[in-house]
Image: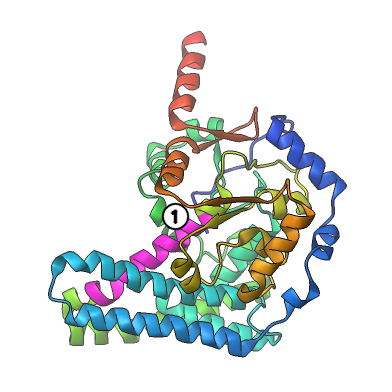
Amino acid sequence: MPSAVASSPPAGPPAAGPAVIETVAFGRRTSLQDLHRAIPPACLQRSVPRQLLGIAANLAGMALSWWLLAVNPYPWLLPILWFFAGTTAWGLMVIAHECGHGAFSKNRRLNHFFGNLLMTPFLYPFHGWRLLHHHHHTNTNSIEKDIDWRPMPVAIYMRLPWRTRTTYRLIRTWFWWAGTLHQLFTQAFDSSHVAFEKPRDKAYLRFSTLCVLIFALIFFPLAFFYLGVWGVLKFYVMPWLVCYGWFSLTTFMHHTHPEVPFLDRKSWTPAASNLCMTVYCKYPRWMEFFGHDINVHSAHHVAPSIPYFHLRQAQRALKESFPEQVREFRFSFQELWQRLSRLHLYDKKTGLYMSFQEASRRHGKKRRSA
């Protein structure tokens, strides 16, 4: 799932840090078929009724959160209720994510119907997201092509206009929670994006964009009329922001890790991309329940059509077969802070990350020696 500011590809030979060497070696001796063989066939069995139960659980949670927001007399409780409302709403986008990968049903039209139905109220065009996300899956951690949290090479960052550089810096630090919103506003409606290059893809994008437009033209006038400005903020905007915060957090924690490299076209391979360069971040179980285990991410990248209720079994199977390549850790705010404070730019020498501070020091030294 999305996103940070995109960058131009760097030039030159592949990086040669230890993490890069190990990842490249695994990718060259392993195929995607090897990874798929490690997953039990039962993990690929879809079930529309179970997906609908997932939707029902999220709708029930949202209904409860809206009722609590309506009757709550205490202003200090609002952030807690907004967090709960946004978390339960986030699960609907995860089910839409299932639809985008064909994990909801074997029927493509049913997948597209529920995908549009679930994602449109969040103002994200389903097919725009689906095609961008497919581009990410096809090019995960490619330094030239990936679009989700790809670190910008230092040399390119230093040459950017100050506005673009500031935007990138904010999304990599204090405004990390807006990374997916940035993708929504800058890429999801852009028919010239490489993810929408086929005429059929452009038609899909137009359809989902029209769905969002129709929803907005009907929903917002009615919402402002019946609820007023504060009501729209309380019941829609704040949970909406929390939902997108979850979207940004999960994709950020999946693909930004001090030991996970980005590779150039000479070193990148599908097997390494899908197993070694994704991370399983464990959250409190109630959050994973409402988020439908989207954080069980290694198995999801290896076989995106696995339904969410089989991801844990598939993850265990991959870990048994490839214990050295599967990365798992438990979420903590300290872990998040360490990434936000250090993992900023692409270090070509190691294939990993460099902080803004280190990049500034190196750039300053180069200017003084020139």
> Hey, which quadrant is residue 232 in on the image?
bottom left
Amino acid at circle 1: Gly
The structure residue drawn at horizontal position 49% and vertical position 72%, both measured from the top left corner, is 289
- In the image shown, does 355 or 195 lie closer to the viewer? 355
Q: Position of residue 280 (x, y in %)?
A: 59, 56
Which image quadrant: the N terminus? bottom right
Q: Up-down: is 4 above or below 193?
A: above
The structure residue drawn at horizontal position 80% and vertical position 44%, both measured from the top left corner, is 26
Q: Which residue is mark 1?
A: 179
**Membership of 155 in magenta stretch:** no
The majority secondary structure of the magenta stretch comes to helix
237 displayed left or right of 72: right
Q: Position of residue 90 (x, y in %)?
A: 44, 71
Mark 1 Cα shell of 10 Å, populated few (<14), some (14-19), many (≥20) = many
* Colouring method of the image: rainbow
Q: Position of residue 25 (x, y in %)?
A: 81, 40
Q: How many marks?
A: 1
The structure residue drawn at horizontal position 40% and vertical position 60%, both measured from the top left corner, is 245
The structure residue drawn at horizontal position 55% and vertical position 30%, both measured from the top left corner, is 155
Q: Position of residue 38 (x, y in %)?
A: 81, 62
What segment carries the magenta color?
Answer: 233-251
310 displayed left or right of 288: right
Whether residue 72 is visible to the viewer of this picture, yes or no, is yes
Which element carries disc 1, helix, strand or loop?
helix
Whether residue 266 is visible to the viewer of this picture, yes or no, is no
- In the image shown, does 211 or 181 lie closer to the viewer? 181
Q: Up-down: is 171 above or below 343?
A: below
